[in-house]
Image: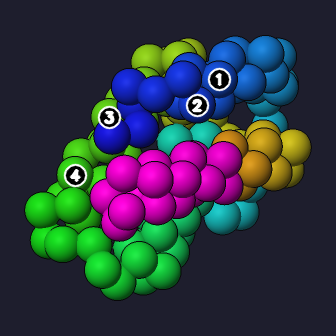
Amino acid sequence: MVTDTDGYVHIIEYLTEHLSLFEKTAEPSANGKTVMAVIENELSEQIISVCSQNEALSFNQRNTVIREVDSIVYDLQEILSGVVNNPVTPEQHAFIKEFALLIKNLFDTEIHTHLLS
């Protein structure tokens, strides 16, 4: 669905262009959120939004979206393998939030172009 699109390749390239952001480490914070926890939380929020905004999606289409998100999380774990368990910095959190929005936009585009047309 989305992981085999040029848009996804561009989003991953965008991430790799900003890997230096993840070289910084933060002191453990009171909330204890790790880079991976923030990735999972932000992507979950955006995918819930995708599904709720597209009520016409069938059960199978929703499952396809979930499988795609699992694949995206796996890709992110691979790319950020050295830092996924590090405490997240505010700058990293902001980037992850933006990245999750880009993923949501990619899903929205694919859904409206291919699934609901």
The quarter of the displayed image where residue 16 is located: top right
**Marks 1 & 4, CB-CB < 8 Å contact:** no
Amino acid found under the numbered disc labelled 2: Gly
Which sits earlier in the primary sequence, circle 4 or circle 2? 2
| Residue that label 1 marks | 10
Q: Which residues are magenta?
A: 100-117
80, above or below 35, in the image: above
| Residue that label 4 marks | 64
| Residue that label 2 marks | 7
Please tell me whether the stretch drawn in magenta is mainly helix, strand or loop: helix
Residue 61 falls within the magenta-colored stretch: no
> Depth check: 70 or 6 in front?
6
Which sits earlier in the primary sequence, circle 4 or circle 3? 4
14, above or below 62, in the image: above
Q: Is residue 60 left or right of residue 35?
A: left
The quarter of the displayed image where residue 52 is located: bottom left
Amino acid found under the numbered disc labelled 1: His
> Rounded to the nearest whole Å, what is the CA distance between mark 4 and mark 2?
18 Å
Residue 60 in view of the camera? yes
| Residue that label 3 marks | 71
**Marks 1 & 2, CB-CB < 8 Å contact:** yes
> Depth check: 56 or 47 in front?
56
Which sits earlier in the primary sequence, circle 2 or circle 3? 2
Q: Quadrant of the N terminus?
A: top left
